[in-house]
Amino acid sequence: MNVSEATIETATRALQRDGYIVIEGLMSADTCQRAHEEISEILRSASFGHNSFLGHRTRRVFGLLARTRSLDEIVIDPLMLGLLDSVLDQYQLCVSTAIEIHPEEMAQTLHADDGIYPLPTSLGPLTVNSMWALDDFTEENGATRLVPRSHLRPEKRVRDPQNEVVAAMPAGSALIYLGSLWHGGGANRSDQPRLGVVIEYARSWLRPQENLGLIYPPELVRGLPSRLQELLGYNLYEPFLGYVDGKHPRELLA
């Protein structure tokens, strides 16, 4: 689906039906180029992973929004937030990670992101993830693999690669998928690395994977757009989950 064709309603229906959607052109060319340049520089000092899940030929940088401002506009993209409003209601950042898969990397084990939460599937979607392509994603260079509609299965830990598809997409696209959908990084059989950025959101009453309070202190968040501040943990899940000294956490930024 091209960004010019996408609406919150059509994207929500596709996401709930298939568990994922690809929106081409959701990131501007200028933003994509700037993000690629800044994040590539950050990754120069990153080490390769140390196990099969993180990848022996994959570099990652965590807490990415504390290191670059090049991604701010995609984190609060109106279409993205409208989709999240429909699926999660109240939510905050859960993870922000750069992932650079290098040549000779093997395919990642299929997994569901919300499997880390020991909660029943009857609660509905717990997380929504987005993979933003800073390079063209192809089957050859390690594009994300997905099992369509696997989010509809009642058991989170059942692995079944049948009907697996590859989310090939041009740079500037966003792959958006539910946390209960089975997926994994692909094998890179090309001669160039492929770079993507994961931005994951979780319901506000869940503890996020990354410790937002330590990664994003007030001196870093002060001055950012108010909606981004809220997503970085400076917000309440009504009536008072997440307060600081009995007050709304935005008071720390005053």
Image: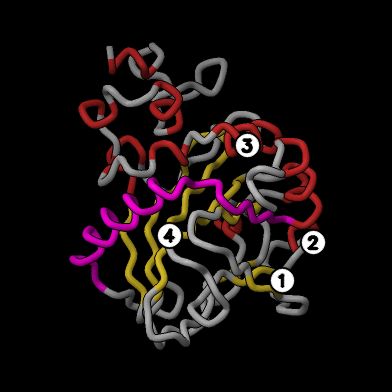
Q: Secondary structure at mark 1?
A: loop
> Which residue is nearer to you in this view: 20 or 56?
20
- The residue nearer to you, when weighing 241 against 90, is 90
In three-dimensional space, the C-alpha distance between marks 4 and 3, rounded to whole angstroms, equals 22 Å
Instruction: From the image, state whether disc 2 or disc 3 is nearer to you.
Output: 3
Per the model, the C-alpha gap separating discs 2 and 3 is 21 Å
Q: CA distance from mark 3 to mark 1?
A: 26 Å
Q: Tell me where the magenta segment starts and ends, as one range.
A: 19-47
Task: Assess whether mark 3 and mark 4 are in contact (beta carbons under 8 angstroms).
Answer: no
**Is label 4 or label 3 in front?**
4
Asked whether the beta carbons under mark 1 and mark 2 sit within 8 Å of each other, the answer is yes
Q: N-terminal of the two: label 4 or label 3?
A: 3
The residue mark sitting in front, 3 or 1, is: 3
Residue drawn at (51%, 48%), measured in percent from left and top? 200
Mark 4 residue type: Leu
Q: State the image quarter where residue 43 is shown.
A: bottom left
Instruction: Return the x and y of residue 87 as percentages of the image width and height.
Output: 69, 38
Q: Which residue is mark 2?
A: 153
58, above or below 197, in the image: below
Q: Which residue is mark 3?
A: 84
Question: In x, y percent, where is residue 85?
Answer: 65, 31
- Residue type, numbered disc 1: Val
